[in-house]
C-alpha cells in the first residue's frame, strides 16, 4: 500500500483556510524551517487511505482476541465518552490545584477504589505500564530496606512461573535475580524457596495467577517464609482479571502490588494507546511513594502531597490521566458485585474453552481447572504431524481469529496460551472450539495447508527476530 507521502501531488488540498481577521505577521527567517515535506492530498484520498489502513488492523472490536497474559477484553465505549469530556481534556497539568479539583477528585476516587480492590493502604497512579509499576515497586522496596539501614538485601527471588518482566525488572532495578523452580503442581517449590531466602533477600516477586494460569496454592506459606527472612513481598497483579473482588493481595500478606489498568480495567492497549500500572503498598512503604500523591484535605478539597521519603518522580506530571478516567468509569459502572462477577466470568470462560478442547489438545496442567487463562502444549501434535504451535496460530488468522500467546511460558514446549476474557459470549467461544477442533484434524489430514498459513493476511510470516531487532518504523523522506 502506498504511503500518503507517495500519493502526494503538489497543490492538492484538503481544506481552505478562512481569510485572516488580523494583520499578517512575518516571522524572522531564522525561526523558519528550510524545508518541510508534507503530503498534499484531497480529503477523499486521505479518508480512503486511513479507512483502508484501519481494515488491515485487527483489534478487540473486530473479533475474538485470546492473547494470554494480555487481557485483551472489550472496552465499553462509555469509558471513552467520559475520558473525552471537555472538562478533562482541556486542562493542563501545570494548572493550580484549586482550578482542577474535579480531576484530582477523580484520581482520588480511583486510588481509593484500587486500594479497596487490592487491600493496600497507599497507592501511586504514576507508572505508565505494568513493567514500569514493577520497577517502581522494587524501588520502594529498596528505599524501605536502605532507610532502615538494612543494606545487605540485594537479591530478588523470582519463581520460574513468573511473568518474563519480573526477572527483567529485578535486574533493571539493580538487584540480583534468584530463580527458583516450580514443583510438580507448577507452583512455587517451597523447599527451594526456604533454601533461597536469607539476610540478602530484598523481596520475592510472585505472579499470581502464575503464567500457567493457576492460582498459587501455597501463597500464605510463601508469604510467611519470605517475611520471616526479612524480605518483602511483591505481587504482580497484571492478571488481576482472574481474582478481583474475590481475593486481595493485601490480605494474603503482600506488601506491594502493581495493576495493569490497560488490562483488567478496560483500556484499549496493544499498539492502541497509553497504559497505566498503579502501584499499591502497605502503610510502611507509603513514605517512599513517588511525588506527588493525591490527598483529600479536612475541608473536602483535594491536593497533591509529597511523601516524606519519596523515591522521586517516575513519570512526567501525574501519569496517563485518560487511562485513569476509563478505569474509574469502568469500576463505578460495575460496582462491587460487578467487579467480582467480571472475574468469575473470566474464569468460567477460560475453563469452558479448556474443557471443550482437552480431549484433543494436551493441556500444560492436565485434569484440573484453570483461572482466567490456560496453556496447551502442541508438542505431541508436532511430533505426529509436523504442525507446530506457530502453524496453528497462523492458521487461526485466516479464520478471522487473533492467535493466542505463542511459545510462552518458556517452560512449556510448543505452548499456546488462551485468555478468552469475560466479555466473550458462549456463541463466540463455541465457534472458536469448532475452529480449533477443525485445525487439529487438518493437521493430520493436510499439514501442508497449516504450514502455508496465513494465506489471507496482509503479511505472511515475517522474520520476527529481525523485525524486533532491526525495526523499520518510518518512511525515509526524500531529503534524508
Ligand atoms: C502484561 C504483564 C506484565 C507487563 O505489563 P506491561 O504493561 O506490558 O508492561 C507484567 N506481568 C504480567 C503477569 C503481565 O501479564
Image (cartoon, rainbow, N blue to C red):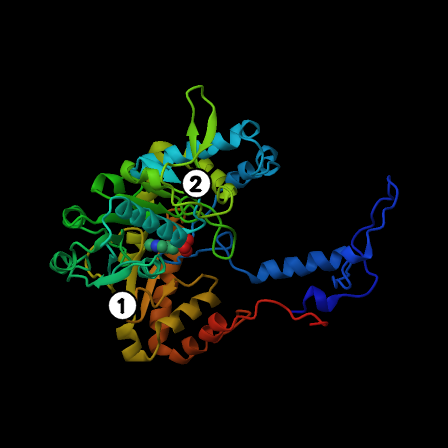
| Mark 2 beta carbon near ligand 1 (under 8 Å) | no
Side of 15 relative to 480 (left or right): right
Q: Is residue 140 above or below residue 430?
A: above
Tag of residue 412: 1
Q: Position of residue 353 (x, y in %)?
A: 32, 56
Q: Identify which residue is drawn at 43% across, 40% down.
A: 291
Residue highlighted by disc 2: 291
Q: CA distance from mark 2 to mark 1?
A: 41 Å
Please tell me in which quarter of the rendered image ligand 1 is found: bottom left
The one nearer the camera, 443 or 19, is 19
Q: Is residue 457 above or below residue 320?
A: below
User: Does residue 390 appear anywhere in the picture?
Assistant: yes
Q: Position of residue 441 (x, y in %)?
A: 34, 72
Q: Position of residue 250 (x, y in %)?
A: 26, 40
The 10 Å Cα crowd at callout 1, few under 14, some 14 to 19, many 20 or more, is some
User: Does residue 348 appear anywhere in the picture?
Assistant: no
Q: Position of residue 263 (x, y in %)?
A: 41, 49
Amino acid at each position: 500500500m502506498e504511503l500518503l507521502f507517495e500519493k502526494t501531488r503538489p497543490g492538492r488540498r484538503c481544506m481552505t483556510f478562512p481569510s485572516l481577521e488580523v494583520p499578517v505577521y512575518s516571522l524572522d527567517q531564522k525561526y523558519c524551517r528550510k524545508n518541510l515535506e508534507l503530503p498534499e492530498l484531497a480529503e477523499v484520498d486521505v479518508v480512503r487511505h486511513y479507512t483502508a489502513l484501519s481494515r488491515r488492523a485487527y483489534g478487540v472490536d473486530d473479533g475474538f482476541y485470546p492473547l494470554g497474559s494480555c487481557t485483551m477484553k472489550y472496552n465499553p465505549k462509555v469509558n471513552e465518552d467520559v475520558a473525552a469530556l471537555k472538562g478533562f481534556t482541556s486542562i493542563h497539568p501545570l494548572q493550580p490545584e484549586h482550578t482542577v479539583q474535579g480531576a484530582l477528585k477523580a484520581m482520588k476516587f480511583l486510588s481509593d477504589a484500587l486500594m479497596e480492590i487490592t487491600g493496600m493502604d497507599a497507592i501511586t497512579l504514576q507508572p505508565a505500564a505494568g513493567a514500569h509499576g514493577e520497577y517502581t515497586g522494587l524501588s520502594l522496596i529498596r528505599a524501605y530496606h536502605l532507610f532502615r539501614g538494612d543494606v545487605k538485601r540485594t537479591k530478588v527471588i523470582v519463581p520460574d512461573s513468573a511473568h518474563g518482566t519480573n526477572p527483567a525488572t529485578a535486574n533493571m532495578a539493580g538487584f540480583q535475580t534468584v530463580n527458583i523452580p516450580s514443583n510438580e503442581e507448577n507452583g512455587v517449590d517451597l523447599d527451594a524457596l526456604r533454601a533461597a531466602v536469607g539476610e540478602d533477600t530484598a523481596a520475592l516477586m510472585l505472579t499470581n495467577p502464575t503464567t500457567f494460569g493457576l492460582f498459587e496454592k501455597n501463597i500464605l506459606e510463601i508469604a510467611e517464609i519470605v517475611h520471616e527472612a526479612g524480605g518483602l513481598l511483591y505481587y504482580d497483579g497484571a492478571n488481576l482479571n482472574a481474582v478481583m473482588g474475590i481475593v486481595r493481595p493485601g490480605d494474603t500478606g503482600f506488601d506491594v502490588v502493581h495493576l495493569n489498568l490497560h488490562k483488567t480495567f478496560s483500556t484499549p492497549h496493544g499498539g492502541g494507546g497509553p497504559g497505566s500500572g498503579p502501584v499499591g503498598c502497605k502503610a510502611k512503604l507509603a513514605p517512599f511513594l513517588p511525588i506527588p500523591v493525591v490527598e483529600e484535605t479536612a475541608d473536602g478539597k483535594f491536593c497533591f502531597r509529597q511523601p516524606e521519603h519519596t523515591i522521586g518522580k517516575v513519570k512526567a506530571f501525574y501519569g496517563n490521566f485518560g487511562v485513569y478516567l476509563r478505569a474509574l468509569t469502568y469500576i463505578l459502572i460495575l460496582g462491587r458485585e460487578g467487579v467480582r462477577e467480571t472475574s468469575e466470568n473470566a474464569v468460567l470462560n477460560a475453563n469452558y474453552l479448556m474443557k471443550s478442547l482437552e480431549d484433543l489438545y494436551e493441556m500444560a496442567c492436565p485434569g484440573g481447572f484453570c483461572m482466567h487463562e490456560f496453556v496447551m502444549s502442541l508438542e505431541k501434535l508436532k511430533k505426529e504431524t509436523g504442525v507446530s504451535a506457530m502453524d496453528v496460530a497462523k492458521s487461526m488468522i485466516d479464520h478471522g481469529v487473533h492467535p493466542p500467546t505463542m511459545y510462552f511460558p518458556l517452560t512449556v514446549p510448543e505452548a499456546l496460551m488462551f485468555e478468552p476474557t469475560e466479555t466473550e459470549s458462549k456463541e463466540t467461544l463455541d465457534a472458536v472450539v469448532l475452529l480449533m477442533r477443525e485445525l487439529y484434524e487438518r493437521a493430520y489430514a493436510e499439514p501442508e495447508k497449516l504450514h502455508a498459513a496465513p494465506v489471507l493476511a496482509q503479511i505472511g510470516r515475517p522474520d520476527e527476530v529481525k523485525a524486533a531487532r532491526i525495526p523499520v518504523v518510518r518512511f525515509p523522506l526524500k531529503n534524508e
